[in-house]
Amino acid sequence: MTFTSVEYAESLDNQDALRKYRDEFVIPTLRDISNGDSDEPCTYLCGNSLGLMPKRSRELINQELDAWGRRGVEGHWNHPYNRPWATIDELVKSPLANLVGAKPIEVTAMNTLTSNLHSMLVTFFRPTESRFKILIENKAFPSDHYAVSSHLESRGIDPAVGLLTISPRQGEHVLRTCDVIDLIQKDKEIAVVMLSGVQYYTGQFFEIEKITKAGKDAGCIVGWDLAHAVGNVPLSLHDWDVDFACWCSYKYLNSGAGGIAGLFIHEKYKDDTTRPRLAGWWGNQKENRFDMLPEFQPSEGASGYQLSNPSIFTTISLLGSLQIFESATLKELRLKSISLTGYLEKLIQSQLQDEFDKDLIRILTPKDPQQRGCQLSLEFPLKMMQVFDGLHSRGVIVDERKPTVIRVAPTPLYNTYKDVYNFVIQLKEVMNLVYK
């Protein structure tokens, strides 16, 4: 039995102790995805864009609808399922802290990713005449560019001057840690370093600990956009002395499109009221929040940065997924992720060797498993959209990033080795048709 056979993929699945968690999710069918006539599950490798729906999230949301119907406003304190809305965000603090390597006081669920980035820049970006730049990747997610540029403008700083970006070396696809650190050390005008934990386009997992230390040693505030890192790779934000971090929850955390986002602020700032912040009533001390006092008295830690009351439905949907993470553990998921993505890489290079030799396909993501999560970014210099459409017509759901990249993410919570096998076989057939 060779590693290129379907039997080999099935044997790996039979040995997978985490395979039971696939049954926790609703997997779209071929009929639903590609207008076919089969109720077989599609090949869904798009968790880096939108995670699949946990079955328990549907159950929990239905319970909240029931609570709303039965109790109305009383659900804030008298909840039929013992999840009073007045403290609903407390339910997700500990599991979120476990995922990002933090203490519960350092994390909270609130807002959306970009609004949280703005909030953190209000607090941590304190430009001076000598330090006024914010460093991001040149290929950072567009929303990060928009947020930083508009935030600089709000401070009267021209983004052409205040927005500093870094790109890979000529002819390379990913950033070298040494180059990031070298720039931080040389440019004394950097006030905030704000990179991505996992780079959305290439899938590179940055060396967060090393870069954070370099930034702090240089006198910078260091924050991270963890949209593609949380629930994907191991994080130790507290021990790494990260100042702040923000993330969304609808990718690897499977909370649903537009789900509530997350925030980390290091414990050392838990009682710091000297920095400005955007204040809202949900960030007020819980003991007197409903006294409606005009003076803001922030809660301790990250909770003191909350603004409005969190959406019950998005918070509870996130809870459904976090319960699965608590059971599976990120440590075990990471081991499977490395194996699953490694299998994808090995199989695709074996089955499409001719296509690689003809430069019809390239892998942008680092080869070292420690420098990537569960994603391979595949570049198709020619006819990428035709390849993407061909895969979709066969019930293979991946993610395209124009003009040339398809991102493939075998997610360890619900993807199988056979999913990977099916993807590679379908890709081979589609490429034969597109490039014939």
Image (tube, grey):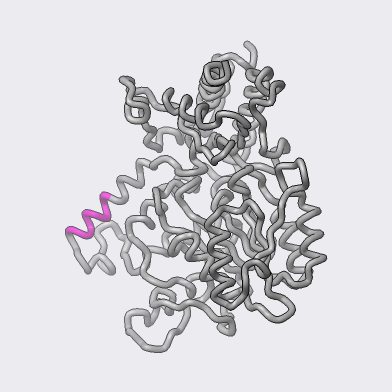
Instruction: Look at the image and say whether residue 219 sits in the magenta stretch.
Output: no
Q: Name the residue at the left extreme.
A: 70
Lateral position of residue 173 relative to residue 398, left or right = right
In this rendered view, identify the residue nearer to me: 370 or 409.
409
Residue displayed at 28% across by 68% down: 76
Residue 298 x/y as whole percent: 47, 80
Quarter of the rendering occupied by the N terminus: top right
Residue numbers of the magenta segment: 62-69
- Dominant secondary structure of the magenta stretch? helix
**Quadrant where the image shows the C terminus:** top right
**Residue 189: % across, % down:** 74, 72
Task: Name which quarter of the figure residue 65 lies in.
Answer: bottom left
Residue at position x 39%, y 33% in the image: 27
Q: Is residue 76 left or right of residue 191?
A: left
Q: Is residue 14 visible?
A: no
Residue ID at (50%, 65%): 116
On screen, residue 186 above or below 426: below
Query: Up-down: is 10 above or below 63?
Result: above
Position of 215 relative to 257 (above/below): below
| Residue at point 39%, 77% (across, down) | 281
Q: Is residue 28 visible?
A: yes
